Structures are given as structure tokens and as C-alpha cells.
Image (cartoon, rainbow, N blue to C red):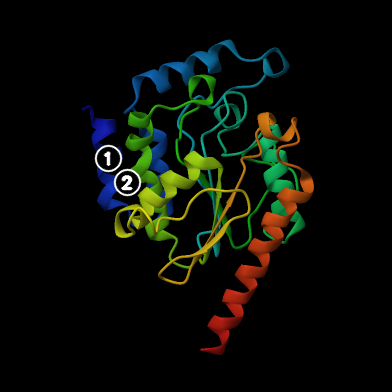
């Protein structure tokens, strides 16, 4: 284990006292040689449409409001999206779907997310992923996902105000349950199952809503439509607002 790896493991697992520390640990991480080699190769070779841009080419940290009430968990950065721009769900079609919906329902100041300096701000929302490096064929291994688990666990622990979690895709859903500790605390029969639009109230009162991931595989085939997608975030907005009203009455 090199110095960067040790720093990342320590900060993400136990030492991170704020989200900025987790972000630094993510960016410094070198745990998965296959993923690091892939991200760096993509950053060198680039896509023709982005050949004049400097790619990020490193692990991508979460992004958003430290006082978030809504947490959104995806799978991994896209090779020419987050791996290019350095921001999760930024610079690709999935990001257009996500930030468009967040803006529509009052969680973002603008619908577009094109790069780290585009002026986007999230309001009461934090966006992250199960894996922090773009994986070949969008398929991280179980071991690679497990290596990233401490980062997601640290973010979940530090985002103390979150009352609603939206998980995108079955892998993001399972990895958040494991990172948050609910996977171990709940028996196999009690663990929330993944299904689009399924809503679960967790033992601490937080709400978990699962959704298909806005990947091209889902959006281009009609498996996930705008109506279905907007319904998820309309419900998330309603749940967050209800949680805020309940807190104000205490």
C-alpha cells in the first residue's frame, strides 16, 4: 500500500471530519490499478469531440450541499463524462437527465452541468456514486466497488441531515445499503429490494426511493421515460418537504 492509498483508506474509513476531506481522499486514491489505468488511458486518448479539452482522468468525488436533505447515489463516472469533467454526472446524457430533474424540482440553480466551473449549485441535495473511477464497459468489479465503499460510507455518515435517498440502478441501491450499514442491520427479508419507483421507510424514518439509472441503455429504449423519471424526483421533493415540516413542528 502506497502513501496515497494509506491516506485515502484512513480518511475515508475513520479520519474524515468533513466532505472536503473525503473529496481529497477520493481524488488521491490509487487502490484499483485496472480502473486507474483505464481512466488515464481515456484521458490521454480522448474522444474526438473533446480532443481540445484537458480530461480530469482521476477518481471523481461527490458533489453538492453539505446540508443536503436529499442524497442521490449513482453507479460510476462515465469515461467521457465525469472522468473528463471531474464532476459526478457531468458532461454526459445521464447528467443531463439528473441535473435537469434536480433543477425542475428545486434542488439545483440551473438544469445544465457541463464542468466544474459552470456555476451549478445544488440546494439541499448531494450527488455521489458507488464507484469513483470510470470502469471499462461501465462494469466495476465487486472488489473495486468494495474498495470504494468507505468513501460512500463516510459521505453518508457526514451528511447528517439527509432524510431521503434516491438510488439509481440496482448496483447503486445495493452499495448504498451496504455503505450505510442497513444491509447488515436488516435481515435478508427486511432489506429494501430494488425496483423502479419503490419506496421504503427505513427504521430511522428516512425514506429510500429506487429508480432505474438514466443510462442510454434505459432512456433510449424507453425503459425509463421522462414521465417515470420526473415522478421519482417529484416524490423526493414531496418527501423532503414533508420531513422539513415535521422538523419545524418539533
Tag 2's secondary structure? helix
Residues under numbered marks 1 and 2 in contact, where contact means CB atoms less than 8 Å apart: yes
Which one is nearer the viewer's eye here, 214 or 221?
221
Q: Residue at x 42, y 22 (%)?
A: 35
Front residue of 10/106: it is 106
Label 1: few (<14), some or many (≥20) within 10 Å? many
Total labels drawn: 2
Query: Does residue 87 appear anywhere in the picture?
Result: yes
Query: Which residue ends up furthest to the bottom in the rendered image?
Result: 250
Viewer-side residue, 15 vs 74: 74
Q: Residue furthest left?
A: 1
Residue 132 location, quadrant: top left
Above or below residue 250? Residue 10 is above
Task: Say which of 19 and 104 sits in front.
Answer: 104
Q: Position of residue 238 (x, y in %)?
A: 67, 69
Of the 4 image quadrants, the one containing the N terminus is top left
Residue 163, horizontal then vertical, whole percent? 51, 67
Question: How far, Cα to Cα, is label 1 from label 2?
Answer: 5 Å
Q: Position of residue 237 (x, y in %)?
A: 67, 65
Which residue is disc 2 drawn over? Answer: 12
Query: Is 53 placed left or right of 129 in the picture?
Result: right
Residue at figure coordinates x 40%, y 42% from the top left = 24
Q: Position of residue 146 (x, y in %)?
A: 33, 37
To which quarter of the image does residue 186 belong?
A: bottom left
Write the residue at 45% across / 36% down. 131
* Residue at 43% across, 49% down: 176
Would residue 15 be found to the left or right of residue 94 on screen? left
Q: Along the horizontal axis of the image, is 126 left or right of 238?
A: left
Vertical position of residue 152 compared to residue 45: above or below: below
Image disc number at residue 9: 1
Element type at mark 1? helix
Amino acid at each position: 500500500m502506497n502513501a496515497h492509498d494509506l491516506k485515502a483508506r484512513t480518511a475515508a474509513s475513520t479520519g474524515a471530519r468533513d466532505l472536503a476531506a473525503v473529496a481529497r481522499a477520493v481524488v488521491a486514491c490509487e487502490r484499483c490499478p485496472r480502473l486507474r489505468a483505464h481512466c488515464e488511458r481515456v484521458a490521454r486518448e480522448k474522444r474526438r469531440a473533446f480532443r481540445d479539452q484537458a480530461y480530469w482522468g482521476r477518481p471523481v468525488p461527490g458533489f453538492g450541499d453539505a446540508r443536503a436533505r436529499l442524497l442521490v447515489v449513482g453507479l460510476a463516472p462515465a469515461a467521457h463524462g465525469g472522468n473528463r469533467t471531474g464532476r459526478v454526472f457531468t458532461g454526459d446524457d445521464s447528467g443531463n437527465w439528473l441535473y435537469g430533474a434536480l433543477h425542475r424540482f428545486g434542488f439545483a440553480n440551473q438544469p445544465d452541468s457541463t464542468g466544474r466551473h459552470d456555476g451549478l449549485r445544488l440546494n439541499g441535495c448531494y450527488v455521489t456514486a458507488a464507484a469513483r473511477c470510470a470502469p471499462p464497459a461501465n462494469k466495476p468489479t465487486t472488489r473495486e466497488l468494495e474498495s470504494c465503499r468507505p468513501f460512500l460510507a463516510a459521505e453518508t455518515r457526514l451528511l447528517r441531515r439527509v432524510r431521503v435517498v434516491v438510488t439509481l440502478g440496482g448496483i447503486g441501491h445495493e452499495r448504498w445499503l451496504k455503505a450505510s450499514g442497513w444491509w447488515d442491520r436488516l435481515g435478508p427479508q427486511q432489506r429494501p429490494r430494488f425496483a423502479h419507483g419503490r419506496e421504503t421507510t427505513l427504521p430511522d424514518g428516512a425514506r429510500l426511493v429506487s429508480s432505474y439509472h438514466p443510462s442510454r441503455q434505459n432512456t433510449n429504449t424507453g425503459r425509463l421515460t421522462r414521465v417515470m423519471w420526473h415522478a421519482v424526483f417529484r416524490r423526493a421533493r414531496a418527501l423532503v418537504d414533508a420531513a422539513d415540516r415535521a422538523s419545524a413542528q418539533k
